[in-house]
Image (spheres, rainbow, N blue to C red):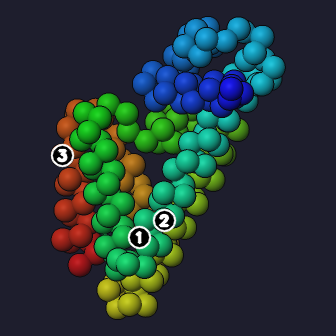
Amino acid sequence: MEKKDTRSDIIRIGTELISRHGYNATGIDLLLKEAGVPKGSFYHYFKSKEEFGLAVIDQFAAFYSPRITALLTDETCTPLGRIRALLERTLAQLTQNHCSRGCLIGNLGQEMADQNERFRARLDEIFDAWKQLFAACLQEAQTAQELDSRVNADAMASFILSGWEGAILRAKVMKSPQPLQDFIEVLFKVTLR
């Protein structure tokens, strides 16, 4: 018989609830009811709701960051093709979930950056790591003469990350994948051509 990993279950269920309702609207009682564990279990694994929220962020980053890394370092594709593949995959996921979830890191950034400095700092670290992945991919594109060498790769990486996250946010608000479709089209037909 497999041993139940209660801490992982709480984080997994908490991630789902926070994705749907937000951090502030996700109460500990609802979380514990969904997880089927007593309140004492929560405080055995987490000192506070804040510590739990940071664990959710870390778990999401541990899951999602390697996927971004794999896409942006896939040498079977051109560097700009890798960026396009990442954005197209996001578009497919948004379409599949009817634009209802978005990016957990972006959602929490919108909700928590002004409310909790520890959350803000951790979210900023994750966004910065993603930006660095985009920048490295853009530098490879420059080396391959796929992108003009005069383009500031760091600034362009920041632009792509901000545009990607902003398009996801607008897609959620509009309940339409159109903002991300528009971003991808303008990025590749105008900005990176």
Q: Which mark is residue 178?
A: 3
Distance from label 3 to label 2 (Cα)?
26 Å
In the rendered structure, which disc, 1 or 2, sits on the residue that comes first in sequence? 2
Q: Is residue 117 left or right of residue 89?
A: right
Pointer 1: what residue?
A: 156
Confirm or deny contact between disc 3 and disc 2 (CB under 8 A).
no
Position of residue 125 relative to residue 132, above or below, is above
Q: How many neighbours does mark 1 have within 10 angstroms: few (below 14), some (14-19), or many (20 or more)?
A: some
Quadrant, the C terminus? bottom left
Tell me the CA gap for discs 1 and 2. 20 Å
Q: Position of residue 170 (x, y in %)?
A: 29, 40
Give me the residue at 19% from left, 62% from top: 185
Residue type marked 2: Ala
Measure the alpha-carbon separation of dots 3 and 1.
Answer: 22 Å
Label 3 environment density (alpha carbons within 10 Å; few <14, some 14–19, many ≥20)? some
Q: Residue flagged by tag 1: what amino acid is it? A: Met
Task: Name the element at disc 2.
Answer: helix
> Which secondary structure, mark 3?
helix
Q: Is residue 124 left or right of residue 151?
A: right
Residue drawn at x 42%, y 24% as measured from the top left? 20
What's the amino acid at mark 3?
Gln
Residue 160 location in percent, x, y?
38, 62
Q: Residue furthest front?
A: 1
Q: Secondary structure at mark 1?
A: helix
Query: In this rendering, would 6 be left or right of 96?
Result: right
For label 2, the crowd category at 10 Å Cα-Cα, with few meaning under 14, some 14 to 19 and many 20 or more, is few
Sequence order check, earlier mark of 3 and 2: 2
Mark 2 — residue?
70
Identify which residue, 159 or 51, lies in the foreground.
51
